[in-house]
Amino acid sequence: MATMALHDQHGHHNPDHGNSHEHSHDHPHSQMIAAFKGKHNSLDSFLDKSILTCFKPDNLARLLASPDIDLASVKGAFTQLPNIHRATSVKDAIAAGLDPLLDIKSLSAARVSGATGKDQIASNKARLDPRFKIGFSRLYGHAVELNRENSSTSVAGSGYTNGRKVESGTYVFEQDEMPYACVIEKVWKGRLCEECLRGLPVGREKIVECPACAEDTTVAVEDGNHDTSNDRKVEGSSSRAQEPSAAATPLPTGPARFCSRECLETAWKTWHGYECGAAKELRDLKQLTRLALRIYWQNTRHRASIVSKPSRSPAKSDLSSLTSVTAGLSLENHNSTSNSNAPRINGTDGSDIMLSQLCDNFSQLDSIRKTSFLLTGYYLHQLLDLPEDAAVELAHLQALVQFNSFAVKSQNLESSEASESMAHVNDYVIGSALYLLASMFNHSCAPNAMAVFGKNCSSALKKSSVVASKQSDPSRKGPDPRVINVLTNRTLKIDPDLPVQVEISYGPQGGRMATEERKECLRRSHLFECNCSACNDRYAEAVLQKAYKCPKNGYACRPMTEKDKSCPTCGIEIDMPLRRKMHQLMARLITESQAPSLSSSQRLALLKTLESTQSKIFVDTCILYGNTCDQLAMVYAESGDLKKSIEWCKKALKVVVVHFPHDSIEVAQETLKLAGLLFNNMQVKEAMKQVQIAITLYKGHFGANSRHPDLLELYEMEKILRPLV
């Protein structure tokens, strides 16, 4: 999931973005880093420093260089227990009315004795709309597709328009899906409930704190780098992993906080009671490692497992045999290595999916990643006093969440402090979650559907006119931000001969990234070769690559690519050293213009210099130039200069229309932005035109009866403008 990354535009983690700090305490760690030479990922990308300190560096270096690894060798490299300051008092929790915890080791033993599989829990009543089904093929594995059998029934009861197509804006699930497990993003701790991810009540006296949590007076610092070792499915055009902040942000500490007693009690018996004593150590681990641990608690409570439990210690050659032979989400959907021997999902409506039917692709991982997952699993086994076989289980769960988890997004309505004319909705990544049914969707760089979060259910969204806002009354919680549904953003037509898949984006999308960049990102993060329609559209890609102007004649000559050393029209040679210097200047200006401490005038000056530099070498449809135009529109709106803001917003819209389909959500959002500026500047006729275009685009994505916040805003503008036209 999920999901978007590139955290700048999609919220999708960039796997090549390394941490800024270096290990400097001893030479063996340098040896370990050297072991990764020639590979895409570094040691820091996978292992937290707190985990590394628990293993002998020289043994670990040899372990990483070995082609095989087993639990015994990991155990041999382990040197010391983590330093844990356990101040948790279970007695205090029980005295406060919380239930005694189940014994994890006893439950784990029950799993080994034969309860595995039979007691695994399926998805939480979420099922597909009858117009869709779970299909299966040897090429793609499991996938969500249009239900051709349903379309052949009577048109009146099929739910299809004319019995042959599904309209854009159709919800794929009959009822929204709750996560199998979920974990809050670190930066939102202290601001959101750690169980339901809703906003905490206003006033400390209304916030419910865990009575057993240790008082933590240390200050954790977020170094400004995101977890780069894992990719989550994320979608949307402007999602952020956290609120804008400086490079180093103090992370909230102290006891776990909840919005209500109900959330505290649920969290205590499902995960927090087991983590409470080691909360400080767990807080420093990567996001998806913490999610894997939440899944482990869920599995153990329900006597479920995704790996077979051998009766002996695994030998070196046994680690790959421990891999769960499963299918579920075919993340190898365009890869010939897809495992056709995986267990099939029995039903077609998705209501009986189990965790063991999701792909963890563990056998497909490189040895470095397998090793890091097993090291982390063994560390958690020692930290939390888990059964030893939990190390292997947790290693597989880390792989599973890498390929199947979603970034949970929440929308916040924001407006500029200087002007209300640029009020807009921002998406923030507030957590990570695993969903069983939602994990069945395959990827496309030109998706025909998108994941949506935070509704009560799809039917309630269509009927409700209430837009979610910050909740100060815990008794009125509002929509659950964790729930997910999938919404079609294209009209899908039944093909009588071939299955029509419903596809979302795992992050990379056409228009945002070059084709080879997208394909390489998906190879590295999800282990498949993408052959979607966007990746096969070589003509469109070639046109978009022609982003450079002739330095002598400008638009009088045909545009050039980055590799062209001379103008294909007039033949003038390109000064490549000068072009590289201009690229370096633009990179510096982009970085400096994003500094949060800048005043509006300082940011405007930097952006004007950047635009002037870009306009000398780029055509006005280049995506980089469009981003700068969009930023200039924002800054001018904040200063109250709506006329100039509109001018730059139009230029940005021109770029978006070139790079994205005319009916895409990106075009819809940019059109809404322009409509809002025109509306606030009282350019009535032009504003009405853009409002109506935006309404048509949004209806195409969310449905004619949708109560999406952007659509409600557009309806209000249309209502005010109509008498004035």
Image (tube, grey):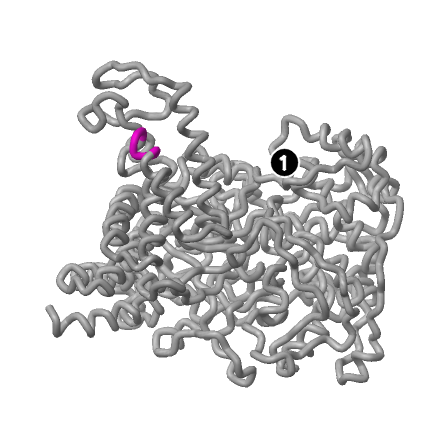
Q: Give me the residue at 43% from left, 70% from top.
A: 174
Report whether residue 243 is seen. yes
Q: How many marks?
A: 1
Q: On the picture, is 200 further left or further right than 9?
A: right
Q: Can you give x and y, in whole percent of width and height, for residue 475 in the image?
A: 55, 85
Which residue does the numbered mark 1 point to in the structure image?
Answer: 41
In the picture, the quarter occupied by the C terminus is bottom left
Snapshot quadrant of residue 722: bottom left
Snapshot quadrant of residue 173: bottom left
Magenta highlight: main SS: helix
| Secondary structure of residue under mark 1 | loop
Mark 1: amino acid: Asn
| Residue stretch in magenta | 613-617
Q: Give me the residue at 12% from left, 74% from top.
A: 723
Q: Residues within 10 Å of mark 1 (few under 14, many from 20)?
A: many
Q: On the picture, is 652 further left or further right than 452?
A: left
Report whether residue 397 is seen. no
* Residue 469 against residue 320 in the figure, above or below: below
Q: On the picture, is 608 further left or further right than 432?
A: left
* Residue 8 against residue 587 in the figure, above or below: below
Q: On the picture, is 534 further left or further right than 691?
A: right
Q: Is residue 411 magenta?
A: no
Q: Can you give x and y, in whole percent of width and height, for residue 262 in the image?
A: 64, 81
Q: Can you give x and y, in whole percent of width and height, for residue 323 in the image?
A: 69, 46
Q: Give me the residue at 37% from left, 44% from top.
A: 605
- Tell which of 64 and 619 is nearer to you: 619
Q: Can you give x and y, in whole percent of width and height, for residue 482 in the image?
A: 53, 67
- Tell which of 189 and 295 is nearer to you: 189
